[in-house]
Image (spheres, rainbow, N blue to C red):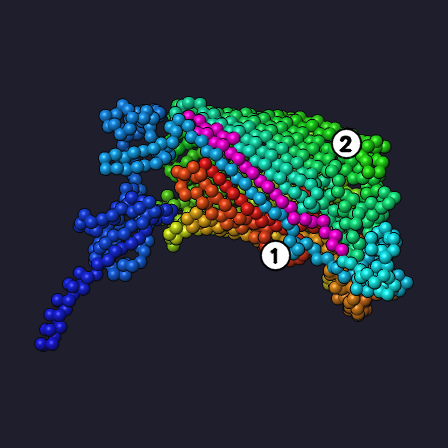
Amino acid sequence: MNKITFKIFVLLIVFPVLCFSQEGTVTGTLTTSSDGLPLPGATIIVKGTTHGVQTDFDGNYSLKCNVGDVIVISYVGMDPKEITVTADMFGTVQKTAVKRVKVKPIETDAYSKALKNKKKERFKIPSIADSKHLYNKKDNYNALHRIKDIQLDSEHVNLTYFNPDIYFQVGVKSNLSFQFVKESNLPKLQSSYSQGATENGSISFLGPETGNIFSYGPNLNTLEFDGSNYIYDNNGRLVTLGNGNGVSSKQYNNSVLNTAISRFTNVYFDVDTDEWTTGLDFSQKNTEDIFGRAQKTNNDLALNFKTLNRNSEELSWKSFVKYSHWKNNQPNINGFRNNLLLNSWVTPVSFNNGQGSVLPDNTQRSFSPTNYNNPEWLFNKKNYDANTLFVANLKNDINIGDDFSIGSQLSYKTAENEQNFGLFTNTVGFENGYLSNKTIKNNSFNAMLDLHYDKYLGDFSIDVRSITRFKNEQLDYTFKESEDFDAFTFSNPNSTTEISNRINRNVLRPHQSVTLKYKRYSKIVFSNTAYISSIQKNKLLLPSSVLKVDLADVLNLDDISYFTLSATSAFDVNEMPLFYNNQSHNSLQLLPSESLGYTSNIDLFINEGLDLEERHDYSFNLDLDFYLWDAYWDFTASYFGSKTNGSVFPVLEGNQFQLQNIADITNKGLELQLDVSERFGSVRWNSSLSFMTNKNKVTKLYSNEERVPIAGFQNVSKNLIVGQPAGVIVGTAFARDTQNNIIIDSNGYPIVDTEQQIIGNPVPDFTLGFSNRFTWKKLKFHFVLDYQKGGDTWNGTQNVLNYFGTSQQSADQRNITNYVFNGVNAQGNTNTIPVDFYNPEDGIENNRFVRYGFSGVAEEAIEDASYLNLRTLELSYDFAKSNYDFFRQVEIGLYAHNLITFTKYRGASPYSSLFDTNSGHNLNFFNTPLMSEVGLKVNLKI
C-alpha cells in the first residue's frame, strides 16, 4: 500500500507539471471550404481569454497556447469553428477550412414593398473636403487603386497618389524565335544508292540525260567521277571505280528546309479615367519561310474606347477600330510547297540541285529535266498571298428603369485577299509558263438591336429578350490567268482568261428568348431564331431550349460551390459563305503523279438552288466545383450529339463541280475536362486535363452514287458513304477472296483489286490535352501536351519515295530475295512462289515498289495516326520589384513549341492536311512537315 500511495502522490505532483509544460505554438492556414481560397482577417482566439491573433493576407496565423485549450475561429459570414489543441498540433502546419453561413432572405411585406418602391440611384461618396474629419483635402474620392505609396509616422498617415485624373499603362512585348524542322519529323531518305536502274541485266548509273527518274542505281561506294565536262555535275560524270579520275562520288544534300527566324513586337498604350478608357495596340511580326527565300509579315493596329458610367441609366459606349495587313511571300497556293518537297525528296543523292537550275541553253537543269523540277527553278518572287482587314464597331447600352435595357451595335468590315502565283516556261507541269491573280473582297455591314427585360421576384427571376440582327454583305471576285510566255518572263502572254463575280446578300436573324431562373443557377430557357435570306430559302422556326438544375442549392451541399446538371436542344442553320473556301475538291480529278500541274482554281459560290444546312444539336452536361485535399477542383462532362441535314459539298456532275446538298451526317461524343488548382505556400499549381471522343456517320446520300469523294485524288480519297464515318478513306487495295486472303498472281506478287475499297477511318479513338502551370513567387513554368489515340492516315509520301528509290525503306529492302507473300493463288491454294524485290535480270519495271506505279497501292500506305506532342513549353521570371516601381513588369522567358513529338511513322505531321485544304486531313502527300520553335520573350510594362 505504501508503494501504491507513493506512486499516486508522485503522479499528482508530476501531472500538473507535465500539463503546464505542454505549451507551444499552433501554426496554420485558414481557407474557405467552398473554393479553397485563403481567408485573411479572420479572428483566432483561445476560448475564455482575450488572447488571439488575426490571419494575414494569405490566411496564415501563429498562436501560442497550451494542450487542452480550445481555439475559436470566427469570421463574418462564416460558421464559427472550435478546435481543441493537442500535443501533435505543435510543430506542424494546420490546414483548416470554414464554411460560409447561408443567409436567410428577409421575408416581410414591408421589406418587399420597400424593395419594389426603391429606385436605383447613383451612389456618390461625398468629398472629404466637406467632411469634418479632415483626413485629406483632395476633392476626389480616394480609390485604393490610386494609392501609390503609404508612409507612417507617429501622428500621420501620408498617402502618395498617382495622378487622380488620368492613369496610363505602357507595355512592350517582344519575341525572337527560331523555327526549324527536326530530322525525326521528316521521312527517312537513303544516302547510299545513285541515280540509275537495271540495264542489260545489270545495275547501272543512268544520269539526267537518259531520262531515268529512279535511284535504283549502284552503291555510291562503287562509283567515281571521270572529270569530264558534264553539264549536270561540275565534277564530271559518274563511272565505275577504276574508270575515272579517282575522285570519289559524293552524297549531295538536296534539302530545301532551313532554320527560319521569327521576330514579334507588340506595343500597347492604355489610358484610364473615372469616366472612360481607351487603348492603342500595335503588333508586328516578321517570319522567314522555312526555305529561307522569303518573308511573311503581319501588321495589326487596334484602337478601342469605352465609357465607364456608374449611373446605369446613362448611355454607355464601347467602340473599336482594327486594321490588319499580312502578306506571305511563299504561300502554298496551288500546292506549291507540296510540289517543292516532292521534287526535292525524289532527287537522287548523286545529283546536286545546288549547282544551278539553268543549263547553257536556258532550259531547266534537274535530275530529270522533262519529268521533274529542280526546286531552285521553282523559287521566284511572283508568289504571294496578301490579306487586308478593316473593322469598325460601335456598341451602346442603356437601362430604362430598373428592369428594362436597350442595347445596339453597328459594325462594318471589309476583308480583301489577293493570291498571286507564277511559274516560268519549261516548268514541268506548266511547260508554257503560268501566271494567275485571284482577288476576293468581302464587305459587310452588321446591325443589332437588343431589348432586354429582367425582373426579380424573390427566389425567382424572369428574363425576356429580343435580339434582331441584320447583315448586308457583298462579294467581289476576280480571277485572271495567263499562259505561254517567253523564257524567264511573265510578259506578253499568248493566252489570257479573266472572270469575275459579284454577289450581294441580306440576312435578317430575329431571336426571342424567355428565361425563368431560380435562385443561383437553376433555369429554364425557351427561345426561337428565324433565318431570312435574300438568296437561300428562309427558316422561320428554329427553336432551342435549356434546362439547368443547381443541385448544390437544392440539396444544400455547402461544401460544394457549384454542382449543376443541364440539358440543351437547339435547331439552327449553317450559313453558307458567299465564296466556298474549302478547296479540297480541286485535286479529285488528278492522279498523284499529275500533281505537278495541280491548281486550286475551281472556285465555287453560293447559289439560289442550295437549301439551308439544317442542324440539330443537343447535349447533357454536368458541372461540379468543389474543394478537396487542399485543392480546388472543377469537373465538367458533356455528352453531345448533332445531326446536319443537307450538308453541302462539291459534287462532280458532267465534268464540272457544283455545290449540292448531298448528305445527312450525325455526330455523337463525350467531352470531359478536369481543372485543379492548389497552393503550397508560395507555390501555385494549376492543371487541366481534357478528354474528347466522338463518332460521326453518314446516314443519307442525296445521290445515286454509292460514295461521294470530298478530298484527295482519283485513286485515294476521303468519301461520304452511307453507314460509314464522314471522310472515310477509300483507295486502291489488294484483291482478296471470300475469306479475306490476299490473292497472289503467277509471278508471286499480290494482285491489285479492280475496284477501290474502304481502307481507313480517319476518326481517332480519343484525344487528350494536358496542361500544367507552376508559379513560385515570380517564376513561372508551363507546358501543354497533346495526345491522339487511333485514327488512320494515308501516307502517300512514303509510297512515292519507295517508287523512286530515294526512301530508306527501298534501300533496306532492295536486296531481299526469295520472299514469299502471304496469300493464296487464283485456285485458292497457299502461295509458295518466292520473289526477289530487285533482280537486275527482271528489269526495273518488276521492282517490288516500281511495279505498283507512282503512288503504289493505297492500302499499303495506311498508317496509325496516333501521336504525342509537347506542344508548348515555357519558363519565365519577372524581375520587377513591385507594382509601384516605374517598371511594373520585366518578364524574361524562354519558350518552345512542338519540341518533342512521337508518331507511328516518320514524316507525320499531326496538324497538316493535303494542300492545306479544310477536308484534306489524314491525307499526307508531301505535306509541310511539323515545325518546331524555340524562342526568347521579353514583356515590359510601366
Q: Is residue 870 above or below residue 511?
A: below
Marks 2/1 in contact by CB < 8 Å: the verdict is: no
Identify residue for label 1.
902
Image location (x, y in percent) of residue 288: 65, 43
Residue found 66% across the figure and 36% down from its top: 327
Image location (x, y in percent) of residue 935: 57, 47
Q: Which mark is residue 67?
A: none
Identify residue for label 2.
480
Residue found 88% across the figure and 63% down from its top: 243
* Residue range (magenta): 252-280
> Quick check: is 414 in the magenta stretch?
no
Image location (x, y in percent) of residue 785: 55, 52
Residue found 77% across the figure and 56% down from its top: 349
Decide which of 885, 455 is in the foreground and name it: 885
* Dot 2 alpha-carbon crowd within 10 angstroms: few under 14, some 14 to 19, many 20 or more: some
Q: Main secondary structure of the magenta part?
A: strand
Q: In the rendered structure, which disc, 2 or 1, sits on the residue that comes first in sequence?
A: 2
Decide which of 793, 172 is in the foreground and name it: 172
Q: Is residue 868 above or below residue 638?
A: below
